[in-house]
């Protein structure tokens, strides 16, 4: 009878130690998952970056990638939203007057936005520099020639998948107007 009591005590001790080990493993897993929790930046172009957001500035977001110490900066214009590890979401570009249209090819050239403000393209991906000239030229046709050149730029930008063009060089002469723009998406 005394031996049965010792066996029972030994069994309970073993069970208690086993329960502690299991609890330690569960706690360890929980801590490791919470340490690895990351923020996700959803870019305007659809890419997702798994990062640790460090700071949100008026124009930019600062972050590091997992297992890196290098500080990265991304312009808010290129960010759609951030999903923090806590589950909270912060949306950007919601207040933007113009959302970038989806361009599927040259046939969407009318959707391409033309701007002369650099702030409209900050943080976007540069696709190409495009230079087009009008066909006619002359004082009477200067506005029509400019519009024709811009139309050709929009068609070229759309064929390359760009949704916005920054006009960087406006015509200086009245003869055979040439317009230069940089396409972005």
Image: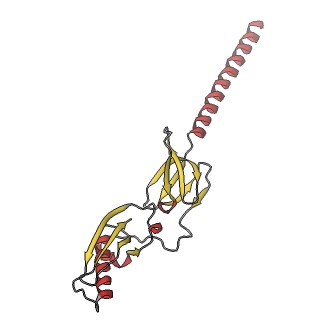
Q: Residue at left 59%, top 57%?
A: 89
State the quadrant of the N terminus: top right
Q: How many marks?
A: 0
182 vs 10, nearest the viewer = 182
Which residue occupies the extreme top position in the image? 2
Along the viewing direction, whichever of 145 and 93 lies nearer the viewer: 145
Q: Position of residue 56 (x, y in %)?
A: 58, 54
Establish if 46 lies above or below 110: above
Q: Is residue 148 above or below residue 180?
A: below
* Picture layout, residue 96 above or below residue 11: below
Q: Residue furthest bottom?
A: 140
- Image quarter hosting the C terminus: bottom left
Q: Residue at image x 46%, y 53%?
A: 48
Instruction: Answer with left or right where residue 171 lies relative to residue 88.
Output: left
Q: Which residue is drawn at the image coordinates 44% and 59% (left, top)?
A: 46
Left/right of residue 70 with respect to residue 157 in the rendered view = right
> Quarter of the image holding residue 88?
bottom right
Q: Position of residue 117 (x, y in %)?
A: 45, 71
Location of residue 91 in the rendering, given as x and y in whole percent from the top left corner: 57, 62
């Amino acid at each position: 009878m005394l031996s049965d009591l010792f066996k029972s005590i030994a069994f309970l001790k073993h069970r208690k130690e086993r329960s502690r080990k299991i609890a330690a493993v569960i706690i360890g897993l929980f801590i490791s998952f919470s340490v690895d929790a990351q923020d996700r930046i959803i870019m305007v172009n659809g890419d997702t970056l798994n990062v640790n957001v460090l700071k949100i500035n008026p124009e930019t977001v600062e972050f590091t990638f997992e297992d890196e110490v290098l500080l990265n900066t991304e312009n808010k214009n290129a960010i759609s939203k951030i999903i923090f590890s806590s589950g909270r979401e912060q949306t950007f570009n919601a207040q933007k007057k113009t959302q970038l249209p989806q361009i599927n090819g040259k046939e969407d050239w009318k959707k391409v936005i033309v701007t002369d403000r650099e702030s409209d393209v900050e943080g976007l991906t540069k696709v190409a520099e495009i230079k087009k000239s009008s066909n006619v030229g002359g004082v009477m046709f200067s506005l029509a020639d400019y519009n024709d050149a811009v139309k050709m730029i929009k068609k070229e930008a759309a064929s390359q998948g760009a949704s916005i063009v920054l006009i960087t060089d406006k015509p200086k002469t009245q003869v055979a107007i040439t317009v230069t723009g940089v396409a972005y998406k």
